[in-house]
Amino acid sequence: MPLWFFPALVGVLAAASLLAGIWLLLHLRDVAAMFGRHSGEIARGPGRRRASNGAVWAAIILFNAGWIGALVVWLFVMGGDANLVTDASI
């Protein structure tokens, strides 16, 4: 693998996690409604149409997979295991 592969992979995973986190913040009412215990517990205010539960779950999964994946790659690189698979020759 080229030398730039692992930093690029961490960057892609971090960007995916960042975008999913921003989407979750923008749809915070939908996240709260999905995790509400009772149907009348959370009253919706005026605003946009509600996002589907599937979209909220997909964003949560993408957010967590992004930061966990970036952490795993970082630990792999910092542990020295990436030295065996990285081709640093010119």
Image (cartoon, helix red, strand yellow):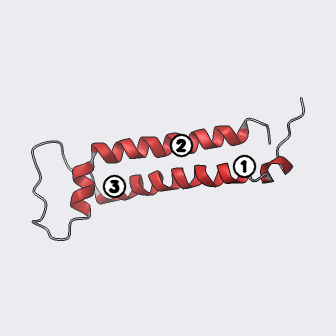
> Element type at marker 1?
helix
Mark 1 lies on residue: 78
Q: Which mark is residue 20?
A: none
> Element type at marker 2?
helix
For marks 3 and 1, the one nearer the N-term is: 3
For marks 2 and 3, the one nearer the N-term is: 2
Residue 55 left/right relative to 28: right
- For marks 1 and 2, give the CA distance: 17 Å
Q: Nearer the viewer, mark 3 or mark 1?
A: 1
- For marks 3 and 1, give the CA distance: 33 Å
Residue 85 percent across, percent down from the top left: 83, 49
Q: Nearer the viewer, mark 2 or mark 3?
A: 2
Amino acid type of disc 2? Answer: Ala
Residue drawn 35% across the image and 54% down it: 55
Mark 1 nearby-residue class (10 Å; few <14, some 14–19, many ≥20): few
Question: Which residue is most to the top?
Answer: 90
Mark 2 lies on residue: 14
